[in-house]
Amino acid sequence: MTRVESKDNSVRLSQRLRSGGFRFTRQRQHVYEVLLRKRDHPTAEEVFIRAKGGMPDISMATVYNCLDALVRSGLARQVTVDRGATRFCPNMREHCHFHCSVCNRVFDIGLSGGAPAGIGLPRGFKAARFEIAIHGTCAGCSKNGHRTDSAGRGDLQAVQSRAAARPCRQPNRKRFPFKALPKNGAH
Ligand SMILES: [Zn+2]
Ligand SMILES: [Zn+2]
């Protein structure tokens, strides 16, 4: 990132935080830069580890606070694609997520032009945004001979059946003090 880009980013960040009702702080800027630097959808804990690299005295509570401010200011979004901890994504363009069940990585998949083909909403329903997770095998893992399992068909039915199979209580799920986002805009 050049100096000019970094300056532009901090002005933009400051404006967005203010419009969300938050103050600009060094910590919030640092956590935002951590998210922008490596867009691999890190968990809060991973953000914390990375943030400590450039700011050794930052605490986990501060990182949670910063992530909360970024999400509420529309600078990042929470992503839940599997039963693991919530992840964070600074890409605010309309997109969905592809979760590779082999390497556990999450990829952004662009959604140009709104609803993906094949999603037939009931009459009268209007989608505002999409929270779609596709599960399967990424290109790298496919090349290494891993086959896509039945949950990786990548169609909505697969997503829905996974959602239906998900237990109400998720004991392995890390506690996160954010309200869970609705699964998709139709609900
Ligand atoms: Zn993979
Ligand atoms: Zn994303």
Image: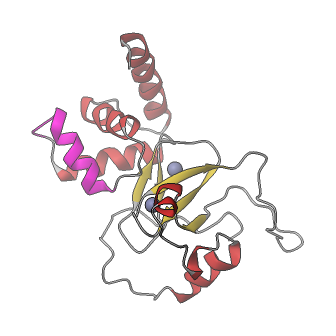
Q: Residue at position x 39%, y 87% from top?
A: 169
Q: Quadrant of residue 187?
A: bottom right
Give the side of residue 102 with respect to residue 59, left or right: right
Residues 166 and 19: in front is 166
Name above or below for residue 164 compared with residue 49.
below
Give the side of residue 17 with respect to residue 45, left or right: right
Give the side of residue 161 with respect to residue 42, left or right: right
Name above or below for residue 186 compared with residue 150.
above
Q: Residue at position x 68%, y 55% from top?
A: 129
Q: How many labels does the image show?
A: 0
Quadrant assignment for the N terminus: top left
Give the side of residue 107 with respect to residue 85, left or right: right
Query: Which color scheme did the rendering employ for the protein?
Result: secondary structure
Q: Residue furthest top?
A: 4
The magenta-colored residue range is 43-57
Name above or below for residue 134 compared with residue 129.
below
Q: Position of residue 170 (x, y in %)?
A: 37, 83
Q: Position of residue 66 (x, y in %)?
A: 31, 44
41 drawn magenta: no
Name above or below for residue 178 compared with residue 33.
below
User: Which is the main secondary structure of the residues drawn in magenta?
Assistant: helix
Q: In which quarter of the image is residue 158?
A: bottom right
Q: Which residue lies furthest to the left in this view?
A: 57
Q: Position of residue 38 (x, y in %)?
A: 37, 40
Q: Residue furthest right?
A: 123
Q: Residue at position x 20%, y 48% from top?
A: 49
Residues 101 and 146: in front is 146
